[in-house]
Amino acid sequence: MPSGTAPPVFPLGNGTYDGAIPQKNPSGMRILFLTHAFNSLTQRLFCELSERGHEVSIEFDIADSVAEEAVALFQPHLIVAPFLKRAIPETIWKNHVCLVVHPGIVGDRGPSALDWAIQEGGEYWGVTVLQAEAEMDAGPVWASAGFPLRPAKKASIYRNEVTEAAVGAVLEAVERFAAGGFVPRHPGPEARGRLRPVMQQTARHIDWQRDGSATVLAKLNAADGFPGVADELFGEACRLFDAWPEAALRGSPGELLARRETGICRATSDGAVWIGHVKREGDIKLPATLAFPAAQNLPEAPLEGWWKSKAPTWQDIAYEEAGEVGFLSFEFYNGAMGTAQCRRLTEAFRWAAGRPTQVIVLLGGEDFWSNGIHLNLIETADEFGSTPADESWANINAIDDLAEAVLNCETHLTVAALQGNAGAGGAFLARAADLVWARDGVMLNPHYKNMGNLYGSEFWTYLLPPRVGEEGARAIMRHRLPMTAPEAVKLGFYDACLPGPSAAFRVDVARRAAELAAAPDLPARLAAKAAKRRADEAAKPLAAWRAEELAEMRRNFYGFDPSYHVARYHFVSKSPHSWTPRHLAKHRDLGWEVPVA
């Protein structure tokens, strides 16, 4: 739009928009999200805009007619598209302001923006909020934000830097829209971005004979999450994900060198990398050593104990100490905790509780603290001599064992420090610790019902009501919506929300944990903790709380109602959405009516 041109007037349901919030909705705007899925970015924006008084409703991008119907029902003042895989229908963008969140710098266009930036080793990247037009990603810009581009997995950058930049840019764009008078402009010749094609597998291809570790990691990082890098292992076609550097192991380029727990180490032209997950043709994503039974023939490369390795390598559970504080991290892919992982983490925690320290900090992983039981492993249990129901039962009991070990720890103060997101059982597992500190920016989904009405365990019936009250507990379990860290603290569910990116958060956590360990009242706190546990045990043993929860879970796993198994299948298979859940689509509630001025 040329400089000085008056902003256009956009039809808005039964009125017009002239740059100001309509008086019929003075507390905020009706904002409709058109999105491919309710992913972490969409959840964060939903919470941020809702907290600012806007009424946000969500429609999954299923078909043009469905989106058009959503617009007609909700009559939004503004449409935001946080995560789309196709264009907004012309019938919508021509009649409404539609703000598209593009994970690229100003002027950048194309669906593989972040992939290209990571694979080519860019040093700086950004997010642009632009207005939808006929040409994808080419509309006028409402806001943008940038960030240094660290060498990391695409999914990690998306959940952290992209999400933070997108939140800032979207909030700025929404404020500009609400205030009126702002004229968005198309990128000029000074814009650094450019049109990029879809990144094909030919561009992602790894030449194991020639590519060095840095190149291999860049290619795998750029494809992490989706679509992975097409390759071959043990003579079978597959996609590779979840790469980690290796500093010590060496071999002939392309050679499979070793295995460790669920990872496989493969030689590059100048070193080696670990491959944590793979997806075979026609299958779902699985840990590499489980997807290929032949991996068991590779030599094992175990680590010496739980201590964090000094050299770069793949290590899913690691322990460090600083004075009187022990830090136990567990970097499980996508936060999923399988039966074996839960058992190993329980063993590691008990070992840490035997160390001559005062405080144990459960750090989780950088992107996820925990998302509870491992649905992909449960779905494929038949391939490993079990059944989905039996593996579900084994997995929930293993994670309950971990929660019980944390609850019964009398030798240390325990802190769950959430630097990454947490959901389902993981959100309640964290509450087993004496204190829960969450980084501002992490998203929490403390509910189970979206997975086929699961009842849930991890002692939530024991832990939650004393924190938030009986009615508060019922509300959280029924809510089915995401929660921010500040909201969790406000409700009393968690104890503190600490600011900053992950690195600053870890520094703050270490300082606070050291202060706890050095506090003169620590012996009294430990004694009070032990006394309360004994009193609670006398009133109702943990075994009784656990048995009651597991009786409900047994019905979910083995009962007549297959809802859990159906929901799990669609979740792990990433089945296309056929409708938007009603708790997200407010406009489809039978009682919904557009407010009248």
Image (cartoon, rainbow, N blue to C red):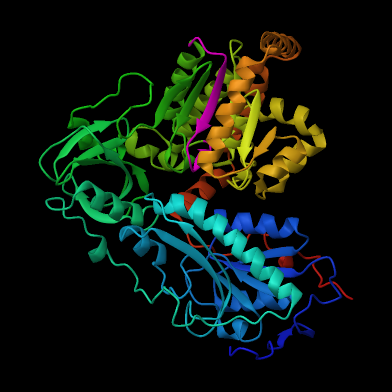
User: Residue 484: where, in percent of width, then height?
Assistant: 66, 46
Q: Residue at x 25, y 65 (%)?
A: 203
User: Residue 77: where, in percent of width, then height?
Assistant: 73, 75
From this view, report whether residue 133 is shown above or below residue 275.
below
**In the displayed structure, does residue 577 sit left or right of residue 54?**
left
Q: Is residue 370 visible?
A: no
Q: Nearer the viewer, residue 433 or 385?
A: 433
Residue lying furthest left in this view? 252
**In the displayed structure, does residue 178 sit left or right of residue 258?**
right
From this view, report whether residue 415 is shown above or below residue 128.
above
Q: Which residues are magenta?
A: 355-372
User: Residue 79: where, in percent of width, then height?
Assistant: 65, 73
Q: Nearer the viewer, residue 122 or 391?
A: 122
Q: Is residue 370 magenta?
A: yes
Residue 260 in which image quadrant: top left
Q: Is residue 305 magenta?
A: no
For the C terminus, the image quarter is: bottom right
User: Residue 483: where, in percent of width, then height?
Assistant: 67, 47
Q: Is residue 156 visible?
A: yes
Q: Nearer the viewer, residue 221 or 456?
A: 221
Residue lying furthest front in this view? 190
Residue lying furthest right in this view? 597
**In the displayed structure, does residue 398 sit left or right of residue 460?**
left
For the N terminus, the image quarter is: bottom right
